[in-house]
Amino acid sequence: MEKATTRFAPSPTGYIHIGNVRSAIYPYLVARQSGGKMILRIEDTDRERYVEGATELIEDTLKWLGLDWDEGPIVGGPSEPYFQSERLDIYMKWVQKLLDSGRAYADPTPAEKIDEYRKKCEQEKVPFLYRNFRPENPPKWEPGMPIRFKTNPKEYSWTDAVMGDMHTGPEVLDDIILIKKDGYPTYNFAHIVDDAEMGVTHVMRGVEYLSSTPNYLALYEAFGLERPVLVSLPHILAPTGNKKLGKRDGAKSATEYRDDGVLPEAMLNYLACLGWNDGTEQEIYTKEELIKSFSLDRIQNSGARYDETKLLWMNGQWIRRIFDEQGARALYDRTTHFWPAEAEEFPEEYRVKVLSIIYDRLKVLSDLKTMTTYFFKDPEVDVKMIVENKFLKKMSEAELEDLLKTSIRELTALEDWNADSLQEVLNNLLEKTGKKPAELFSLIRIALSFAPFSPALNLTLDTLGRETSLARLNRAAAAI
């Protein structure tokens, strides 16, 4: 592939949805694979929907995912400024070319009159096309007056890198607005100008813009511009598969997933593969592997169903991969904000040890808050949890008490309190008591943690230490 210049051009209108994130991932992969560059451009011309701080949220999300941009806010570049609201003079220069050539006109028609035209078309059951009502003698443009493109209806054919060969007739072309009353350009116009000025070779955006493509082609033609590679990205669908994914379907913003403890590697991996695959059975990809394997022709041309369960599974895979390949310390460095409050009173080395025996059960890092509390404070004794356990409910309270006391005696006699010797004692207890592992180990595990889950019993005992472990076992025996 020749060096590609791609762009991610979000609007700062609020939180960054995971669908928006995928629209950043694909341009990034194309740019990096070709040795080209990716531009970050902030399309902030819709001032009514502008949200303060949204730009910083976009930048922060891209940095979190490792999607660095080559031109744009913060890093600068030869096509500054990269905020559309700061490029108004540039748009006016381009629109003046169309005014001078007769391909654009000032439109003083009031909104009420346009509504009349629209209602007339509804009554006559014909499509509303503004070009059929354009003013015959438009005035000279003045500030506060919209500017429209004077279209030349015709057929258009083009190839979309995902959707394939496309064709439309003249009936879809209309006199679209280029400059609004407030002096800001419309998306339909501004992105054409910006892409041309910035040398964008691949325009990647949601499939919802496919129907507007003929109007974009007409503008390319009017300006004498070469068409870029057009890439329409199918929607990410709700879990039901029958509509576009939205906030009410349970999908959170990228920031919320990060705050829940989803790793950037997992989010990047999941979204890149949501609607794309390289033809293999591989599911776990590093960023470098995605860059190497990605190709536009492997993007599916239908919507991909969002599956949060798959995302969380993939996050668990990445948690284990980081631990296995980079070590406990590397994973621990990512857990700073996810421990229960009580953990702050314990030394870092102890928390690393806890993480080392619990990490393979984590789906998200925030699970640490609920899954490790008993390592940092004594749990409330709940005899009901013992006597109603499916492996223990057939035993009498006297049997349970005796079984715990036998375990306490054997553990108390142990000289070297470590994982290996503890496992040996536990195995000996199975022989001595004649109990099954599910019975004996469930009793000791619950007495130590009073939690629905804990790691391997010998590792739990080793981490809690002799004094804490024996104290908890004695407390549970006394409660029974």
Image: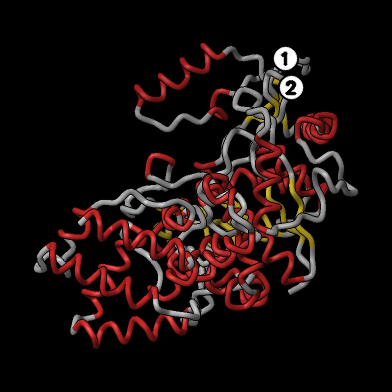
Is residue 60 depicted above or below 368 in this figure? above
Callout 1 secondary element: loop
| Contact flag, marks 2 and 1 (Cβ < 8 Å) | yes
Q: Which residue is mark 1?
A: 144
Q: Nearer the viewer, residue 286 or 21?
A: 286
Q: How many marks?
A: 2
**Could you say where residue 134 lies in the image, as x and y percent from the top left?**
60, 23
Q: Quadrant of residue 398?
A: bottom left
Displayed quadrant of residue 67: bottom right
| Residue at image location 34% in from the left, 78% down from the top | 410
Choose top left, top right, bottom left or bottom right for residue 74: top right
Compared to 250, does 417 lie above or below?
Answer: below
x%, y% of residue 354?
52, 64
The residue type indicated by label 1 comes to: Gly
- 123 to the left or right of 391: right
Q: Position of residue 232 (x, y in %)?
A: 55, 56
State how far apart marks 2 and 1 are (Cα).
7 Å
Specify the quadrant that holds the N terminus: bottom right
Q: Is residue 253 left or right of residue 289?
A: left
Question: Height in image: 81 above or below 457?
Answer: above
- Can you identify the residue that label 2 sits on? 183
- Please name whichever residue, 157 or 435, is drawn nearer the observer in this view of the structure: 435
In this rendering, position of residue 388 left or right of residue 115: left
